[in-house]
Amino acid sequence: MGNDKNSGEPNESKYGDATFVSLPLLKISTGKPLPGAIFLCLGHRMVRYRSKDDPIEPAEYDKLVFNRVRYIFFDEVDRMAFDRWVKNTEAADTALEPAVAANAEAAPIAQAAMDQRRAIMDIFSNPKDDKQVAAAVDVSKRVVTEFMRKPFAINNIQQLQRYAKGAVDHSVNVSMLCVFLGLRMGYSHQVILENLALGGLFHDIGKVLIETRSDGGLTGSDDPEMQKHPVLGRDFLDANKEIPNEVKLMVAQHHEFLDGSGYPNKLKGLAVYDLARLVAIANTYDNLISESKLNTIAERCSEAIEKLERDFESKLDAKKLEKAVKILRYSFL
């Protein structure tokens, strides 16, 4: 699956008697009924992908991301409906971040998070472009600089945490969580925090290299092919000399559990790199939030904390987990 449009602002294109308008995939909301049919541009022709009132589920969204789709299209007659739909989605996102909207000190951190989101989407869309990786490194360093400049501008990580509609949002959430938790756990050295930001942002980069099934679907997390993504991610980053070895270890080991039940190498105890243990906590926490069926981000966070304590004490670093739970609970209650 591909997409003929890969850069620039959304615009109109004529195909036969119809006029189609492009919309960046980043603006698509998952799980909500579409206001009109959407199309993909395949081989210079428009192919209907979803009908009006159909939702795009997170797994389908990731399928589009990992198949290098940057834009979807809709018929120009549905422009007003899609404009309202996008504005309502953006308004809902803003409503989840009230303190950021009201706090000028937090604005640079929020902007850096948005820039990270665009940077990781660019990599997922074109993983062969080394410039995209360099851009993601630069913006992740800026995230750390802004956090260190105003370490308490963000007291509540919910202010930056999105409902992860797919791998793009999840990657940014984990990166921001790693920096937030790292700072409050006492990791005060800027280089360490930068490595945590990059380890979080790149932890799932190997998924872009996973082979898709014959039907175009991604493999599940319990599938041996999907369980290769930490190694594929490390190998992908090996080609870029700007990426520190510490970051590659985090990417390779973020699914390893201390009891040996993780993957891909079933490492135990001290064999798991110290900072990879923190990425594993952030990754597990955000996954629990995404999987929750509760309505609000606060309810999902509370539930995720309870599950971290109850279900993962033997799997994750116990000392780091205890600190992380205290920080997370204090930060939003």
Image (cartoon, rainbow, N blue to C red):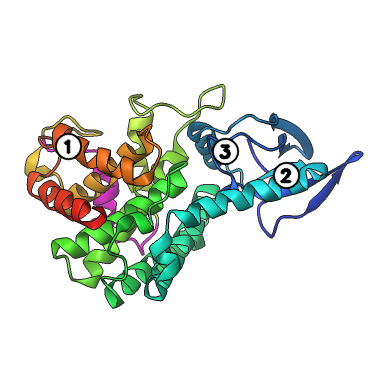
20 lies left or right of 202: right
Please state which of residues 38 and 127 is positioned toward the viewer in this rendering: 38
Q: In terms of sequence position, does the residue under pointer 3 or pointer 1 come before the other? A: 3
Residue 245 visible here: no
State the mark number for residue 166.
Answer: none
Residue at the right extreme, as displayed: 17
Q: Position of residue 124 (x, y in %)?
A: 50, 48
Please state which of residues 31 and 223 is positioned toward the viewer in this rendering: 31
127 lies left or right of 20: left
Q: Quadrant of residue 98?
A: bottom left
Q: In terms of sequence position, does the residue under pointer 2 or pointer 1 come before the other? A: 2
- Name above or below for residue 169 compared with residue 138: above
Query: Which amino acid type corresponds to the residue marked 1 in the rendered image?
Result: Phe
Q: Which residue is mark 1?
A: 257
Residue at the top extreme, as displayed: 214
Q: Which residue is mark 3?
A: 64
Question: Which residues fall within the magenta stretch?
Answer: 240-258
* Mark 2 in CB contact with mark 3 (< 8 angstroms): no
At mark 3, the secondary structure is helix
299 lies left or right of 259: right
Of badges 2 and 1, nearer the viewer stands 2
Q: Which residue is mark 2?
A: 81
Q: Residues within 10 Å of mark 2 (few under 14, many from 20)?
A: few
Q: Quadrant of the N terminus?
A: top right
Q: Quadrant of residue 7?
A: bottom right
How many angstroms separate mark 2 from mark 1 (CA)? Answer: 47 Å
Q: In terms of sequence position, does the residue under pointer 2 or pointer 3 come before the other? A: 3
